[in-house]
Image: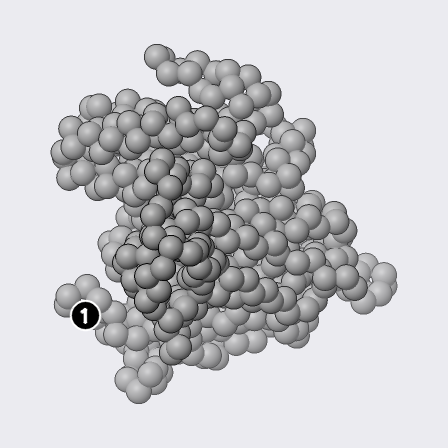
Amino acid sequence: MAAHKILAACTPEYTVIGKTKQRISFNVHLQAPEVEDDEAKRATVALSAVIDTSGSMEGGKLKLVKDSCNFILNQMSSRDKIGVVEYNTVCKELFPLSRTSEGFKSEASRMVNKMQAESRTNLSGGLFLGFEQQSKNTFVDWEPETEAEAEEDQTEPDPEPAIAASETSSFVDVSMKDDDSFSEASLVDVEPTQDPGHAAAASAPSPEGALCFGSQPPPSPQTCAGKKRARAPLDAQLRQGRFAPTPPAGLSSGLFGGREAPPPTALEEDAVRSIFLFTDGLANEGLTKTDKLIGVLSKLLEQAKPAVRVCTFGVGEDHCPELLGELARAGNGTYYYVEKEEGIATAFADALGGLLSVAAQNVVLEFVPAPGVTTCAVHSSFSTSTTPEGAAAVSVGDLYAEEGKDLVFEVEVEASAADGEECEDCELGAVRLRYLDVVGATLGSEELKCVVRRVKDVPKGQAPDAAVAVQRARVETARAMQAAESAAKGGDRASAAVRLQGAMAALSLLEQRQGLPQRDAQLISQLHFDCAEAVENVATAEAYSTRGNKLLWAKMRAHEQQRTCAREEEDEAGSTNAALLRGPRTMPAYMHTYATPKQMSMRGVVKKSVTR
């Protein structure tokens, strides 16, 4: 099978520099290849959908979420896997990670459509239960082996299907310290409880500061990471929203009439693993502090092998964008701000379009500086580390088909030992790229040199390269948005506006530059528009709390990672290329979007499939 290479290009800020000590930037652009729309060639998707079913979801929002889940089911091939977790006060696994065969899709849709809105919001419990699904690295194949077996399984269904249980379960035990940090997070296999009533009577109170979750509560005294753990009475756990009631042994869900689950199968090593976390409100049950929740998830994600991506979806004005934004950042995913209910399906379709078109996985870029060159900074939101040989290593993660990424490096070059007038080549260093080519099922690699010329007298009026200038502007604008959000959160909305207006002034100067490529010009115009929109939405406390903080987080993350956040106006402008008006500002006639062709296509499909 032919390899599908990532194209890499290194562009220095200036092609010619002086012979004295110099500081210079360069941009590394990565371009993922086009991938044929062939389900047999793409990577398998393993998705855990974690759905908020608290009382505020009642009505149109929950209906649209159900419709969107059904849309996702219909778009998945028989090679893909999906599991669903619902959470309100109680968190439960609607069904485990399962192969999306045709028979399963029908059963899963029936289960999804039965979800009802009630009670409060235990976001942490739902999220951790979704992570538990992924951490098992297994799936269930529910499709009966024969037609006769299928008929037999459907003859005498249980009157009320039981909820999730399995041969074994697991729970995460996280010991919290007084300073709000955590000391450990480990997955421990435990045996299921046979009788909920007896379990409640026999159990003891759980230790203070311990958070446990799973398909069933852990048994009484259990050793975890060298410490004795005891579980709380079952009724107390239910009041705390930690667990759903334990079903009778041998049943796994209401799928196929409550038939016994087949033995789990190992998940493909190269499967694209992801969690979609959906909510419309604030976490008010379970772990509710943002810093604690992010700390625990970050620890779990660091230990997850293979990696698990987390995408978050916040609907309306009542959710916490900081929490969802930071969770998405920790999970190397996208935070989708869904301003109106009508945008729910578009956001789900956008995220799914990305998962279904992954061209390269585990993309890592290293810059090895040449002798006499020091790496000063890597301007990127991706995780960056230093290798033993002194290289700056950036973990980019996955690339969607036809997706581009830009990383700006800043280096310092020592003075040249040659004092003559002649030009000399100066190598800044080597850029090394490695990744898994999904379509070719091979490991890909690339290496290129970044070289400039050194002269005694630098030509006057040498302008920085447009591509580097534009990408620096993108990075600096995202930072300005982050600083503005922090200032506005602290009540200093005037300082927030000043930071955004400063970014707009710098962008205006760049917009005046002649000869900018069209896509770069569109990006600068879009950055300017986003800042202007943010200024309006930090003008008052009400505007900031209802819309501004969410807008800033969504746009900041989109520009940081160069990945669409699928807001409704972007979708409309991207499809019509029409000038849209909102108050005194005019949206760019040709709006820049980070959306890939697959994502745009998926948005079009969902509009025809999901209606209110």
Q: What percent of the width, then of the height, locates residue 248?
A: 54, 69
Q: What percent of the width, then of the height, locates residue 165?
A: 54, 67
Q: Residues within 10 Å of mark 1 (few under 14, many from 20)?
A: few
Residue 41 shows in this picture:
yes
Q: Give residue 218's quadrant in the image.
A: bottom left
> Vertically, is 225 above or below 200?
below
Residue 118 shows in this picture:
no
> Vertically, is 458 above or below 420?
above
| Residue 54 falls left or right of residue 498 | right
Identify the residue shown where x is 50% and y is 53%: 10
> Vertically, is 602 above or below 214?
above
Identify the residue shown where x is 32% and y is 61%: 419
| Residue 585 falls left or right of residue 440 | left
The one nearer the camera, 8 or 224, is 8
Query: Can you identify the residue that label 1 sits on?
Result: 177
Q: What percent of the width, then of the height, locates residue 362?
A: 54, 64
The one nearer the camera, 474 or 239, is 474
Amino acid tagged 1: Lys
